[in-house]
Amino acid sequence: MFTTQDEWDRGYAEGRRYRPLTDTERTLIATHLPPAAEALALDVGCGTGELAAHLASSGYTVDAIDWSETALAEARTRHGEIARWLRLDVEEDDGASLNADGYDLITLRFVAPFLTFRDRTLDTLGHRLRPGGALVLITPLAADTPAERRGITLSEDELARLPSRWAAAERHDADGLVLLVLRGPAAPCR
């Protein structure tokens, strides 16, 4: 499992890619998270930009951040200026380059298991949500993931615990993935 910026950059430079966005994910997003007029989205850990491009084509104005400049360069090449591509360490940087007015949707697709300070980071991101906004975690189901790769998943215990930090939560399982929609951060930002 990658843990440093250099490892992520090297992985992307060597051609490592991750599970493509599925039609089921697109449908779940369209059903449960349709954009309102002038809706803003933040795609955390955007990689090569597939989800960011989908959100933009759905009507969101998108900021897409990643730790890997190599991934961002590919996202820019593939998708052009469909999103604002930003190199940012979501756990350590101050986020000054992000939209000061917040976001209606924040997505973390295949990102949460790699966060070192998961609760703190999700709290901080939650406080960047506009009223009525949603933070969405998309992660593989541990039960559908081979034991040697379970480090890329959130455990069922953690998936059950996370909603307690939010006012509302919805869980949708499909195609071996969990889409967890969290609204209204209940915990104060630390």
Image (tube, rainbow, N blue to C red):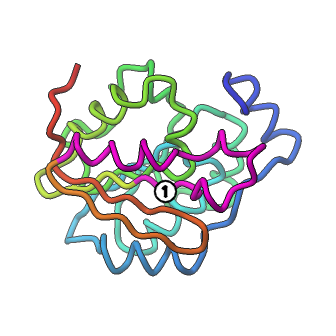
Q: Furthest-right residue in view?
A: 14
Give the number of callouts: 1
Q: In the picture, which quadrant includes the N terminus?
A: top right
Q: Furthest-left residue in view?
A: 131
- Residue 139 in the magenta stretch? The answer is yes
Give the SS element for disc 1.
strand
Q: In the picture, which quadrant includes the C terminus?
A: top left
Give percent across and percent down for residue 118: 42, 30
Q: Quadrant of residue 113?
A: top right
Give percent across and percent down for residue 153: 59, 47
Q: Amino acid at mark 1?
A: Ile
**Main secondary structure type of the part rendered in magenta:** helix
Give percent across and percent down for residue 43: 45, 50
In the rendered image, which residue does mark 1 sit on? 138
In percent of the image, x 22 and y 65: which residue is there? Answer: 38
- Compared across the picture, whether 8 is left or right of 99 comes to right
Magenta region: which residues? 137-166
- Decide: is 159 above or below 78: above
